[in-house]
Amino acid sequence: MSGGVDSAVAAHILKEEGYDVLGVFMKNWQDDGEGCSAAEDYEDVKSVCAAIGIPYYTVNFEKEYYDRVFKYFLDEYRRGRTPNPDVLCNAEIKFAAFLDYAKMMGAEHLATGHYARTFGIDEKRLYKAVDAGKDQTYFLCMLSQAQLSSAMFPIGGMVKDEVRLVAGKLGLSVAEKKDSTGICFIGERKFRDFLSGFIPAQPGEIRTPDGQVVGQHNGVIYYTLGQRRGLGIGGTEGSTGERWFVVDKDVRKNVLYVEQGETDALFSKALVTAGMNYITHRPHGSFECCAKFRYRQPDQKVRITKRRGGELIEFEEKQRAVTPGQYAVLYMDDECLGGGVIDEVIF
């Protein structure tokens, strides 16, 4: 239980269905007063559990999170990539360290407030939630069959308004609590300020692809492909008046490359993943399906071909700002087949 409305209603639903429910709160990051408000969230968990009549516990996974998620997060940024720690947290903490803990406590299942659905008995398959706007299968793409077989997503068949309505009727204190966004350990701080505490800033030049210096950046690792805000070069001499966009990064030379307008440099035709996790099994040979390259992106038609160590994903239509370090997540209609880290982008 996170302290939010989704996991609160999930716990209530399971209790109503006759399950013996235990509420467990995970603490994954040292709350220093600036990051995520773990203490406040835990108070909400206690309030909810008291209201619905279930016992509650807290468990500390700060070391596991730091070793399995945060170190990877920093390493990827040092490489100039843009990682997604939420996907890794599900695979390495919630449905790994936490699942092991749950089984040690004698639990048969691990339920969360994710918006997702599963079907199947001998083989579990992962499907999008009924609420398309809240679907979270993107973040569950790296789960294994063993992990998914223990998972339960009680609110996957509901829309958000229904969830809040249930919480309101129960008088839960979190009924109207704002959804959490972003990465917990960064909290309300500016992202660059947080990251500079672990990876010192190295200012350098902002150039156009033909070598013209148009500004200075605060550290090439802080920028992501397709970014247009925070560049500080709007009035650069020779500017066409169109917005500047990040089109490339050279970490070794510490150079940030930009162009004006939605240029071809922003659009790619394919990518290669570093490995690929299939929740059930990989379809035979090359196959067509849909994919997302970032959360909330509409499904895009693609062709998948096996490559040594990963998959070649070719796009039916060129895609904007596909970013190494993020995840390519595959779908066949509403079923999430799995996903893999974007390792190389092909233009």
Image: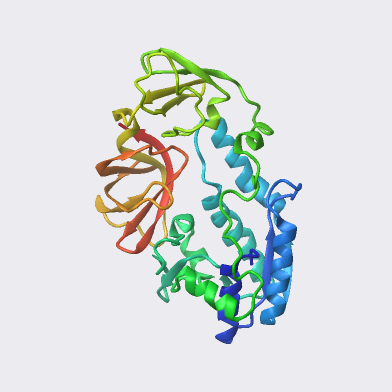
- Quadrant (top left/top right/bottom left/bottom right) for the N terminus: bottom right
Percent position (x, y) of residue 231? 49, 27
Task: Residue 121: name its quadrant.
Answer: bottom left
Percent position (x, y) of residue 318? 27, 39
| Front position in the image: 84 or 142 | 84
- Quadrant (top left/top right/bottom left/bottom right) for the C terminus: top left
Name the residue at 51% across, 52% down.
Answer: 87
Vertical order, 246 against 38 (above or below):
above
| Front position in the image: 173 or 63 | 173
| Front position in the image: 124 or 326 | 326
| Front position in the image: 94 or 10 | 10
Q: Is residue 54 shown to the viewer in this render?
A: no
Please count the marks in the image.
Answer: 0
Percent position (x, y) of residue 255? 49, 19
Percent position (x, y) of residue 88? 54, 51
Vertical order, 113 against 72 (above or below):
below
Name the residue at 61% across, 34% down.
Answer: 192
Q: Is residue 334 shown to the viewer in this render?
A: yes
Q: Is residue 134 left or right of residue 222?
A: left
Vertical order, 14 against 244 (above or below):
below
Q: Is residue 24 left or right of residue 315?
A: right
Name the residue at 58% across, 56% down.
Answer: 180
